[in-house]
Image (cartoon, helix red, strand yellow):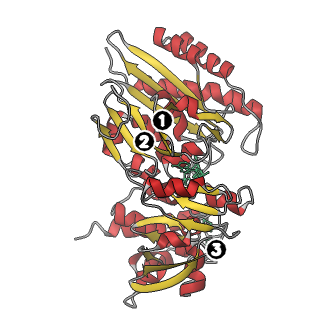
Amino acid sequence: MRAFNYCRPTSYGEAFHWLAGADQLVVPVAGATDLIPRIRDGLLRPDVVLDIKDLPDMRALTPTDGRLTSGEGVPPGLYVGAAVRMNELARSELVSSRWGVLAMAAASMGNEQVRNRATIGGNICTASPAADTAPALYVLEAAVCIKGPDGDRTVAIADFFAGPRKNALHRGELVVGLTIPQPPEGSIGHFEKLSRRKAGDLSIVSVAALAVRTDAGYRWRLALGAVGPTPLRSPESEAILSESLTDEAIDRAAASAYGCCCPISDIRSGLEYRQAMVINLTRHAIHAVMAQMPTP
Amino acid sequence: MLHEISLTVNGDHYTLAVHSHHTLLQVLREQTGITSPKRGCENGECGACTVILNGLPVNSCLVLAPEADGAVVETVESLNKGGTLHPLQEAFIEHNAVQCGFCTPGMLMSSKALLDRIPNPTEDQIRDALVGNLCRCTGYLRIIEAILDVAGSCDEP
Ligand SMILES: Cc1cc2nc3c(=O)[nH]c(=O)nc-3n(C[C@H](O)[C@H](O)[C@H](O)COP(=O)(O)OP(=O)(O)OC[C@H]3O[C@@H](n4cnc5c(N)ncnc54)[C@H](O)[C@@H]3O)c2cc1C
Ligand code: FES
Ligand code: FES
């Protein structure tokens, strides 16, 4: 690998001092599962790699009863530090209790060794349209907590993904974590992905569905990965499913999901196959959620 | 740039000067002389470089060397430290789960980590734990059978 320097700050002051260096390229690193292959391939030539894992609260995984959240009036939910690893999410009882769709997405990623290193902050910062935690975070309506030399800000997950490999961070900023609202009791989530192998590979298409429990029934949320420049929600499908769950409604919802995606052909799949699989996977995800609904 | 790091590998303590841009795999192979972790893809795909880092199986080709400061690392050499083979090693031999052997150290470390986490795994759990370990000659069935054999024997009092 091409030579670079490595630093591991323990305070944000120190981290922002490094990141402000104008004469050199300073790149944050967490699990390095995306970064090292990119440096090896010559896609990135950092002068300094800045390890964020020892910064305060980067590894926190805790319910938010006010603590660790920046804004006022944050609903009770989950706070996930940026450096929390995939297997920590996949195996956490806390995460599975109410945010199961995120645990499922984390468990689907890469392989055991990669999941022991890859972090949620790294996954969203790659801003890959195929980032597997993204559809889950979209339906959970997570917010990304960002820290910079000039202060803190929060960005909705859907605004954080700006385009293929483009995120909403300004130069010198870091993602410190995510806040995820708690879906009401009785809500049901499901994540489904299709890849070239049954496991261990990036998604050709991924779908997250969340049926949010309401007094009257369920309000649906549906998000798709790897079929557009960013992950995306399908508002029309959501409206259809919230209205009715007949076979005909499910067909229309799947067709609407197909309508709102704009996939490309790449090494993992051709365009037409991706389009066809959007319909199939959306249907699977809807049925998987319905199978968990209590019978009236 | 050089960093001085201390780490424990298979119970032995090392203090080494490592390069920022080297990986744990390079440090193990080139600076400690422990060559069981193999250099395959160097991309996190093949698992030939798998070691147990602070209790968890990871690809040592994706760990930056300075990050290993303070770490406890286990490689396949730790399995027969007392001079006798580990039950997993015995089972791999018995089931002919080794051909060229290039994947074997990684397979053994992934299996060891699995049994540490789940002493009696199901076949599905074994397959899941080995997704990141590729073998291009033995095929996976014998490897899975070998692990099942050891897992089953954990039942015995
Ligand atoms: C074999 C293999 C299989 C994989 N399979 C999948 C898969 O199935 N699904 C999937 O989605 N991905 C997959 N990946 C890609 C990768 O593992 C994930 O995207 C992972 O979550 C990246 O996290 P990381 O902590 O390793 O990121 P890193 O490599 O450390 O960082 C990734 C990028 O984010 C930046 N960054 C990291 N943390 C921060 C922060 N806190 N603030 C600001 N910037 C930051 C870094 O500068 C870098 O540009 C796979 C990778 C490999 C090697
Ligand atoms: S050499 Fe590390 S995974 Fe292949
Ligand atoms: S025995 Fe040759 S690669 Fe597995």
- Residue at image x 66%, y 30%? A277
Q: Chain of mark 3?
A: B
Query: What is the secondary structure assignment of the residue under circle 3?
Result: loop
Image quarter of residue A216: top left
Which residue is identified by label 2? A103
Residue situated furthest bottom in the rendering: B83
Query: What secondary structure is found at the residue carrying circle 1?
Result: strand
Q: Secondary structure at mark 2?
A: helix
For this view, does A76 lie left or right of residue B84? left
For mark 3, what is the residue? Answer: B39
Ligand number 2: quarter of image: bottom right
Residue A167 in the image, given as x and y percentages of width and height: 61, 39
Indicate the quadrant containing the C terminus of chain A: top left, top right, bottom left or bottom right: top left
Q: Quadrant of the N terminus of chain A?
A: bottom right
Q: Amino acid at mark 1?
A: Arg
Residue B32 visible in the snapshot = yes
**Residue at point 45%, 57% (across, down):** A53
**Where residue A90 sits: x, y (%)?**
41, 47
Nearest to the observer: residue A187 or residue B111: A187
| Placement of A36 over or under A251, stated as above or below | below
Mark 1, residue position: A153
Q: In this picture, is A20 found above or below A286?
A: below
Q: Position of residue B59 (x, y in %)?
A: 54, 66
